[in-house]
Every structure is written in structure tokens, then in C-alpha cells.
Image: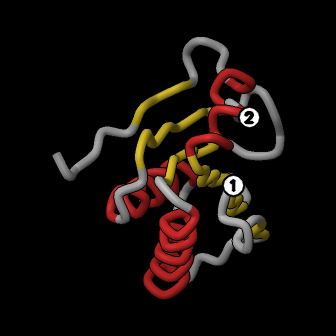
């Protein structure tokens, strides 16, 4: 699975657990760290942890894809899942506003909002 396909799969998994404001940042031209950042908001720390667990379980069991690193699962305010070419950021509202990754990494053309399939 290439990084674009993985990004799309992660967005669908976030949407399944009702994460909000799912945003995709194409960052390959800005950093060597990743091709994409996927950013989403959870309404609570419990939801953030549930979203993380859902992504981890589905990618691991169905696709055999394991994260290289994970951080923030205990606190649940900002969970980061590093899949190499794709880095997933699951925030609660306050933390997302505080760090505002979209503004830090946006260059005008590299931000895309995910359209929920639940509508």
C-alpha cells in the first residue's frame, strides 16, 4: 500500500469512529519526515483513545501494517501514530487549537479536508 492509499484508509477509519475535522496535509515537499500528515479531532480523551485503538487494530489485523512509533496514548490529548510516510495526529479540541499544525505546515496548496462518508 502506498502512502496515498494508506492516507485514504486512515481517513476512512477516523471517520468510522466519528473523528471530526479530518485534514490531510501533503508535506513531502516540506520535510523528509513524511509524505502526509493526517490530523483529526476527538471530542474527548476517551474518544481519542478509541480512535487510536480502532486504527491500530484495523491496520494491523486487516492490512498487516504496524506503526513505527506511537505516543500520547496515556493522556489522550494528542496521540501521534507514525506509519513512516504517514503521520496521524489525533487531538482533542484545545490541543489542536494550541498547536495548530495546519498553519505551521500549510503552504497554500497542500491542505485538503476529508469529506465524511457518514453524511
Residue extending farthest to the bottom is 61
Residue extending farthest to the top is 108
- Image quarter for residue 65? bottom right
Say if 65 sits above or below 105 in the image: below
Q: Give whichever of 88, 29 is nearer the camera.
A: 88
Q: Which mark is residue 42?
A: none
Q: Residues within 10 Å of mark 1 (few under 14, many from 20)?
A: many
- Taking the spot 16% from the left edge, 45% from the top edge, the residue there is 119
The answer to whether the residue labelled 2 contacts the one labelled 1, judged by CB atoms less than 8 Å apart, is: yes
- Image quarter for residue 72? bottom right
Label 1 sits on a secondary structure element that is strand
- Taking the spot 58% from the left edge, 50% from the top edge, the residue there is 92
Q: Which mark is residue 78?
A: 1
Q: What residue would you read off at disc 2? A: 99
Horizontally, residue 66 falls left or right of residue 54, namely right
Horizontally, residue 73 falls left or right of residue 40, namely right
Residue extending farthest to the left is 119
Label 2 sits on a secondary structure element that is helix
**Residue 71 % position (x, y):** 78, 66
- Taking the spot 73% from the left edge, 59% from the top edge, the residue there is 84
**Residue 1 % position (x, y):** 52, 63
Lower sequence index among marks 2 and 1? 1
**Residue 107 % position (x, y):** 66, 15
- Taking the spot 74% from the left edge, 24% from the top edge, the residue there is 104
Amino acid at each position: 500500500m502506498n502512502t496515498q492509499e494508506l492516507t485514504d484508509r486512515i481517513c476512512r477509519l477516523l471517520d468510522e469512529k466519528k473523528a471530526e475535522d479530518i485534514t490531510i496535509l501533503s508535506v513531502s515537499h516540506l520535510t523528509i519526515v513524511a509524505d502526509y500528515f493526517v490530523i483529526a479531532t476527538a471530542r474527548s480523551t476517551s474518544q481519542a483513545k478509541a480512535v487510536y485503538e480502532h486504527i491500530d487494530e484495523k491496520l494491523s489485523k486487516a492490512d498487516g501494517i504496524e506503526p513505527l512509533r506511537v505516543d500520547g496514548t496515556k493522556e489522550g490529548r494528542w496521540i501521534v501514530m507514525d506509519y513512516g510516510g504517514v503521520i496521524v495526529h489525533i487531538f482533542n479540541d484545545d490541543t489542536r487549537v494550541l498547536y495548530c499544525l495546519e498553519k505551521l505546515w500549510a503552504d497554500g496548496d497542500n491542505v485538503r479536508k476529508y469529506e465524511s462518508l457518514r453524511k
